[in-house]
Image (cartoon, grey):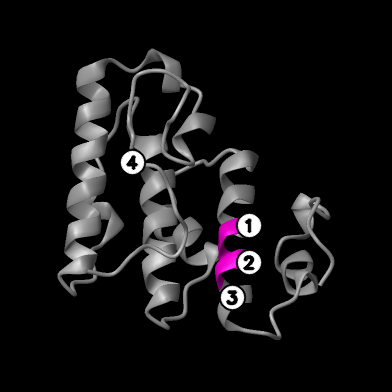
Amino acid sequence: MRQPIVNRSKDVRPTNEGLPCHLHDAPFAADLSTEAWQRLEAVLRSFEDAWQRGQRPRLADYLPADGQERHGLLVELAHEDLDYRLGDGQAARVEDYLAATRSWRPTASAVLGLIAAEYELRRQREPGCAAAEYLQRFPQYGRPNCPAD
């Protein structure tokens, strides 16, 4: 069984402590019921299981049509997908997720989280991956606090 590249907690609770890595940024996080957290956890587990079975699941197939949970779930699914695709040597870029989910209006924090995850995952495999590439691709976010190349 393949281990995720980035170690993220799967401890899902209806508080802001111990949330999956990116759900803690979701503005609705503290408002979700225990049942809602259980639904999110089940969807994330199903998505991850599909990857581990060798499938290439589509984010859209795992998202609710709308509702309070959609944003946080989309952020976490994008991180999982990015992790698996880059881990399997596939090309994956933040722009792919932004383009594929045009109705999604991510927060700056969500986009920066995806940018940071892509950068870190690529740096592990691509010695030439530099922060300058991200500054060119995402000038609207400025220079984040990141270690020098």
Q: Earlier in the sequence, mark 4 or mark 2?
A: 4
Give the magenta-colored segment's residue range. Answer: 116-121
Residue 71 appears in which quarter of the rendering? top left
Residue underneath mark 2:
119
Determine the CA span between mark 2 and mark 3.
Answer: 9 Å
**Is 88 left or right of 46, judged from the image as shown?**
right
- What residue appears at the point 24 percent right and 23 percent down from the top-left corner? 36
Residue located beneath label 4 in the image: 10
Q: Secondary structure at mark 3?
A: helix
Q: Residue at x 76, y 53 (%)?
A: 140
Magenta span: chief secondary structure: helix
Picture coordinates of residue 116, whole percent (x, y): 63, 57
User: Disc 1 and disc 3: Cα gap in Å?
Assistant: 13 Å
Mark 1 or 4: in front is 4
Measure the C-alpha gap from mark 4 to mark 2.
22 Å
Q: Is residue 117 magenta?
A: yes
Cβ atoms at labels 1 and 2 below 8 Å apart: yes
Closer to the chain start, of discs 1 and 3, is 1
Mark 1 highlights which residue? 116
Identify the mark nearer the N-term, 2 or 3: 2
User: In the image shown, does 109 or 8 lie closer to the viewer?
Assistant: 8
Crowding at mark 2 (Cα within 10 Å: few <14, some 14-19, many 20+): some
Q: Amino acid at mark 2?
A: Tyr
